[in-house]
Amino acid sequence: MKKEFELITQIRENQSISREQFETLMTCEDAQVIDFLHQQAREVADGIYENKVYIRGLIEFTNYCKNDCLYCGIRRSNAKANRYRLTKEEILDCCKVGYELGFRTFVLQGGEDPYFTDDRICEIVSAIRTTYPDCAITLSIGEKEKESYERYYKAGANRYLLRHETADEAHYQYLHPKELSLAHRKQCLWDLKEIGYQVGCGFMVGSPHQTRDTLYEDLMFIKELQPHMVGIGPFIPQQDTPFAKETAGTMEETLRLLSIIRLIHPHVLLPATTALGTIHPLGREKGIQAGANVVMPNLSPVEVRDKYKLYDNKICTGDEAAECRFCMQRRMESIGYEVVTDRGDFK
């Protein structure tokens, strides 16, 4: 048995990874070893969640943002962004379509848009909760104060996604404007957990100035936080940002990290992201085969899909919700997985 196989088995058994083990797996060029890594991660996921892939309905409800993060296409200073906001009624229409298609989790994602005050967010969340009491409501609307998070939770939100982006302070400063801090980002995640949300963190793979050291710090933060969800996907440049000419992250590195995260945090809800599907035609299928167990088709109205440009060449911008839903089901069935329409809670 190859020593790398033993190393992977050890990581699985201990649910932890050393700096040296991480270096070995990220630099390994032996296809058999990487196949074994993905297979072990898949076994762990199947042991907990069987061959089920949970489906979340994504509603991108605003592309206004007060922040100026250097990698993001909806950053404040991007004058070329074609801005939009969905009304409460439009958001509820998306939920209605999604509910009829079997979605039982709605993910409201947007930039940090000052128009959507706490009152407005609570009104929207409360309306969804009243209309669809059996559904999970996930928010992904950035950094807020603890009091705001508490209000959303009381209004009916269950889950919150907030990518930490990098657990390395210097790297964080390189990616973000000076008014944002890693300390505050992390505090938000701890606050969310304390309130009672199912919490998701995550990072881009291959972002500018990322190193294996910074990636290892990300893994250590995940071990410390013990989030319910981790969202990772390859960094993809957006043409109207300062990082327009930077090199994109790779599918191979993203898949290795998905598998490692599954092994060190077995119960995690792990999406095969749209970015992964953007960088490779079978990216999402490969993500599932590497240990992921969540997919997030888009429920946003088709006329705004192309305006939510976090990165270039995003897929599925022209598809109706039903097309996205059934396309995803066929894709997952083609690799032996079943898309399930329950809430898909953390086990």
Image: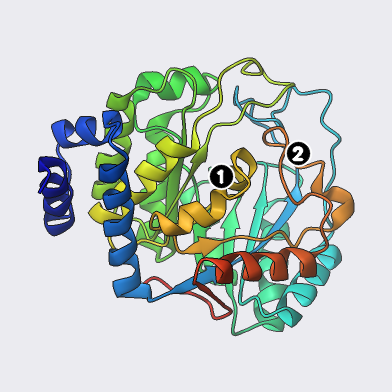
Left or right relative to 28: residue 159: right
Q: How many marks?
A: 2
Q: Secondary structure at mark 2?
A: loop
Identity, as a three-letter code, of the amino acid under mark 1: Leu
Mark 2 near mark 1, Cβ–Cβ under 8 Å? Answer: no
- x, y percent for residue 37: 28, 49
The residue that appears at 73% across and 58% down in the rendered structure is: 120
The residue that appears at 74% across and 72% down in the rendered structure is: 95
Q: Quadrant of residue 219?
A: top left
In the image shown, does 73 or 182 lie closer to the viewer?
73
Identity, as a three-letter code, of the amino acid under mark 2: Tyr
Q: How is the image coloured?
A: rainbow
Which disc, if any, is residue 276? 1
Which disc, if any, is residue 64? 2
- x, y percent for residue 229: 42, 57
Q: Is residue 43 visible?
A: yes
Left or right relative to 300: residue 330: left
Q: Secondary structure at mark 1?
A: helix
Q: Quadrant of residue 104?
A: bottom right
For marks 2 and 1 on the same chain, the one whose residue lies earlier in the sequence: 2
